[in-house]
Amino acid sequence: MKMKWDGELINVPTDGEAEWRANGDEREVVVERTDETNAVRVMVSGLVEMDISVKPIGEQENKVHNYQLPPDDAFAHLETQFRFKKSTDHFEGVLGQTYRPGYVSPVKRGVPMPMMGGENKYETLSLFSTSCTRCMFQRPSSIASTEGLVAQN
């Protein structure tokens, strides 16, 4: 996994403390390696912690989910987990709504590939864009930008 900050590649060491730090005006950002490859924890002080990993799709999972991967190709899952330090009852979005208090998922459990539906409400130009019909995100001016951090596999 390659990590970038403000468009520049950053090196998260594999030994010692295995972390990279950036100190902004109001927030510290720490990227910590949590496994030798493809797994990091990103912490933005006072705002959020994110665990991010990339897991290859194996032969068994390919069969179960019927991905039909060609023998000379490989796919992977991007797995994310968020822990917000400050939140409201107004979370929305494909990921965000699951953090609302009392949220009940409409996803049918026990099927090989559960689908939530309603994706047309959340279509957007990019991961950080607010141009969608249900977006309610506004960054308070006092919060430092985290848009400079981009993960690439």
Image (cartoon, rainbow, N blue to C red):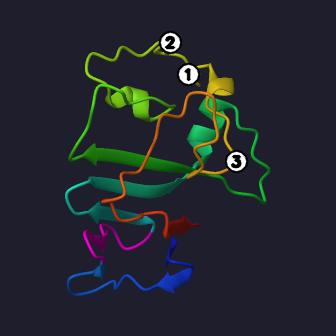
Q: Which residue is mark 1?
A: 114
Residues rendered magenta in the picture: 24-37
* Mark-to-mark CA distance, 2 and 1: 6 Å
If you read the primary sequence from the N terminus, does the residue marked by circle 2 or circle 3 appear first? 2
**Magenta stretch encompasses residue 55:** no
If you read the primary sequence from the N terminus, does the residue marked by circle 3 or circle 1 appear first? 1
Nearest-to-viewer mark from 2 and 3: 3
From the top left corner, tell me how far across and down residue 137 is, in percent: 46, 41
Q: Which residue is mark 2?
A: 108
Tell me whether the residue at label 2 lies in contact with that at label 1, contact meaning CB atoms closer than 8 angstroms: yes
From the top left corner, tell me how far across and down residue 16 is, in percent: 21, 87
Tell me whether the residue at label 3 lies in contact with that at label 1, contact meaning CB atoms closer than 8 angstroms: no
Residue 125 is labelled as 3
Total count of labels? 3
**Amino acid type, mark 1:** Pro
Left or right for 96, reference 112: left
From the top left corner, tell me how far across and down residue 120 is, in percent: 69, 25
